[in-house]
Image (cartoon, coloured by chain):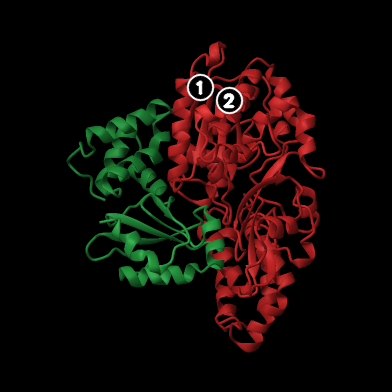
Amino acid sequence: MAEPALIQVLSDEEIREIEEECAHLPDRKSAAIDAMMIVQRHRGWVSDESLYAIGRLLGMSVENLDSIATFYNLIYRKPVGRHVVMVCDSVSCYVMGADGLRKAVEEYLGVGLGETTEDGRFTLLPIVCLGACDRAPTMMIDEELIGDATAEGFDEIFGRFD
Amino acid sequence: MDDVRPLIGIVDTVGGPVDLEAYEAHGGYVAARQALATDPNDIIDLVSEANLRGRGGAGFGTGMKWGFTRGPATTPGGKYLVCNADEMEPGTFKDRYLLEYNPHLLVEGMIIAAHAIHAETAYVFLRGEYHDPYRELQKAIDDAYAKGYLGKRILGTDINLELRIHRSAGRYICGEETALLNALEGKRAQPRQKPPFPPASGAWGRPTIVNNVETLCNVPAIVRNGAEWYQDLGIGDDAGTKIYGVSGRVNNPGLWELPIGTTIREIIEGHAGGMRSGYRLRGLLPGGASTDFLVEEHLDLAMDYGTIQAAGSRMGTGTMILMDDSICPVNMCRNLEHFFAQESCGFCTPCREGLPWVEELLTDIEEGRGKEGDLELLDRNAMFIGGTTNTFCLHAPGAMEPLASALKYFRDDFEEHIRAGRCPYR
């Protein structure tokens, strides 16, 4: 990764939120995950430029930060669509038809797991148990949990996310 | 004014999520006031006497755990209380319910626990995907601060407690308590070498107690009603109530707070409404993905720590996953091992290399490429990878529990796949 000349990549709001986390932790490095999640909430993903800027803000090497970023499945190091669709593939949903649900979503959106629709609207990812097993099969779009998911409801469900 | 369901009985009484006003109207924060006026060591002794055991799955004595760090901190920086709300054990959905519907119960439990161990800082380590629970819990924490239950000089005493939520960025391994502490410190969530155990050296090297959501939620009622009352709630050797859950093809999947020691049959048939018409129960994972299968002969067993362990499994989280006769046991094992292979932190060889290899072998068998000798290979690996001294933490041994038991109870299915060269369920 080439280091960008621009130091000030993060917005004032992002820096304020990260500093707020730092203020409640024994050292600044401990805010690494929070900082990446904050930037991601603002920008959708964590770019190389963002990573350098976070590293500078927290006094960490970009290599160290990237090793943390790539460990966690909810930190995205590649751009994602405007909305992230996650279909549960864990055991309770498996028993209740998760494979069928995933195939139906893939067909509906026209993309496979790890892909983004051409219009940049949805990125489809697998996810582990969402903790709503009494409503299996489940999926999540952004922050919305959808239980008892069936293909019949797709127009209404996906229609809510433009 | 506790009924026999101190954890979530109030949700039915109130008819939905319990806010501060409703919580206080039903005896909320009375126990916290009581506890703050009590000697911390007496609270630890009370919880020990009540026989509260960890509800995250391991069943370790909560009072005993707290007792490992009695008294004020002797090192700079104080002590920490951490609530493990990283509910990621597949098939488990009980802590979500507590967080969404009765968040003040957790806050009150944490006030009492923090006082008992002399912690002035507490964290809730919360799953990243738990958005609704986050909103409810954050609201409860804000309201508790505003009312003087949290912050400096709680309720006019000289006791302080700062309580914050850490929202996780994913990975099942964060549920392992030392991996959780690394994640809390902003690092990769790899389990730590033990000893030292967290009560001696935990978050940022300071004495730390990590307790599950449901465990902490049991504490207020114990303080309010005493150890004997709490012990009497349980049916067998264990004390209190347990939130049991059922998922799979039953008529009424869900959660119920019942006396700990209720039988599996009572939970499935009495509360979950039995199997859906046309489906027969073949097996169940009693407490999440990392527990051994049980079968029909075990249905009349009590769901408590000792009884389920004696039957060769673990009560785990108490939320059971049912396998009906339309589900192929080989493919279900493949699903489980895919999860565990994916979620290995990658530190130890048997886990990092062994789990994907087991998954591949199961895939071969499921897809008709199984060979003679494959089952013996799986047996050997289940024993080797499942050995608790071969890996740093219990991720890989946990992964082998459902597999080893499936090879025992559903061996005919595995053999039939290899003999026929295809999956008979397709």
Judging by the rendered image, the residue that carries numbered circle 2 is B111
Say what amino acid the circle numbered 1 marks. Answer: Leu
Q: Tell me which chain appears green.
A: A
For residue B250, above or below residue B128: below
Residue B177: which quarter of the image?
Answer: top right
**x and y percentages locating residue B326 in the rendered image:** 61, 75
- Numbered-mark total: 2
Per the image, the residue denoted by label 1 is B150
Rendered hue of chain B is red
Q: Which mark is residue B92?
A: none
Q: Position of residue B274 (x, y in %)?
A: 67, 63
> Do tag 1 and tag 2 residues touch (Cβ < 8 Å)?
yes
Residue B80 seen in the current view: no
Residue at left offset 62%, top offset 35%: B217
Question: Residue B329's x, y, as percent?
Answer: 63, 72
Residue located 28% across and 33% down the image = A15
State how far apart marks 1 and 2 are (Cα).
Answer: 8 Å
Relative depth, front residue between B424 and B419: B424
Q: Chain of mark 2?
A: B
Q: Chain of mark 1?
A: B
Quadrant where the image shows the N terminus of chain B: top right
Quarter of the image for the C terminus of chain B: give it: bottom right
Q: Is residue A147 above or below residue B57?
A: below
